[in-house]
Image (tube, rainbow, N blue to C red):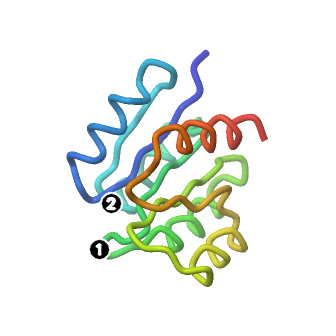
């Protein structure tokens, strides 16, 4: 059975492109907001990994991470951000993120991070 990945980004094109890139190896879902992501996690109850953008309206990636932890301790979370600060990356990891990747995301690095998180 394929592992499941939920891609969360307020940019529809990023969601589609990422899902397309990962769909051969994983079962993918997409959400355009943190709220929609939480609805999918509660409904599907089998999301192995969430790959989420950091900066989104209404709920950022760190807040989404906290809410995911309330629902599912087993779901791995990787946060992707267009800007990097050590403080933000440390906060994400301290809150339970498996990794913090910066945009533009290196495809090989994303692939390794996903594989590693799913095998953790």
- Relative vertical location of residue 81 with respect to residue 106 in this rendering, above or below: below
Disc 1 residue crowd, few under 14, some 14–19, many 20+, Cα 10 Å: few
Image location (x, y in percent) of residue 112: 62, 38
User: Of label 2 and label 1, which has the lower sequence position?
Assistant: 2
Q: Residue 101 bears which disc, if any? A: none
The residue sitting at the top extreme is 1
Residue at 43% over, 29% down: 22
- Secondary structure beneath dot 2 equals loop
Left or right relative to 95: residue 102 = left
Residue at 65% over, 61% down: 97
Depth check: 34 or 26 in front?
26
- Relative vertical location of residue 73 with respect to residue 22 in this rendering, above or below: below
- The residue at which mark 2 appears reads as 33
Depth check: 22 or 8 in front?
22
- Secondary structure beneath dot 1 equals loop
Image location (x, y in percent) of residue 23: 41, 24
Residue at 68% over, 72% down: 95
Disc 2 residue crowd, few under 14, some 14–19, many 20+, Cα 10 Å: many
- Distance from the alpha carbon under mark 2 to that under mark 1: 8 Å
Whether tag 2 and tag 1 are in contact, CB under 8 A, the answer is yes
* Location of residue 68 (image quadrant): bottom right
Depth check: 27 or 92 in front?
92
Residue at 64% over, 64% down: 70
How many numbered marks, from 0 up?
2
Image location (x, y in percent) of residue 21: 38, 30
The residue sitting at the bottom extreme is 87
- The residue at which mark 1 appears reads as 57
């Amino acid at each position: 059975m394929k592992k499941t990945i939920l891609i969360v980004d307020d940019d529809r094109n990023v969601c589609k492109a990422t899902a397309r890139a990962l769909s051969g190896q994983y079962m993918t879902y997409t959400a355009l907001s943190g709220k929609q992501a939480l609805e999918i996690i509660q409904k599907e109850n089998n999301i192995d990994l969430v790959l989420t953008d950091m900066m989104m309206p209404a709920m950022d990636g760190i807040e989404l991470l906290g809410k995911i932890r309330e629902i599912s301790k087993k779901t791995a979370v990787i946060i992707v951000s267009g800007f990097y600060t050590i403080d933000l990356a440390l906060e994400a990891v301290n809150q339970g993120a498996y990794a913090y990747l910066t945009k533009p995301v290196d495809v090989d690095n994303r692939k390794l991070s996903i594989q590693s998180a799913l095998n953790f």
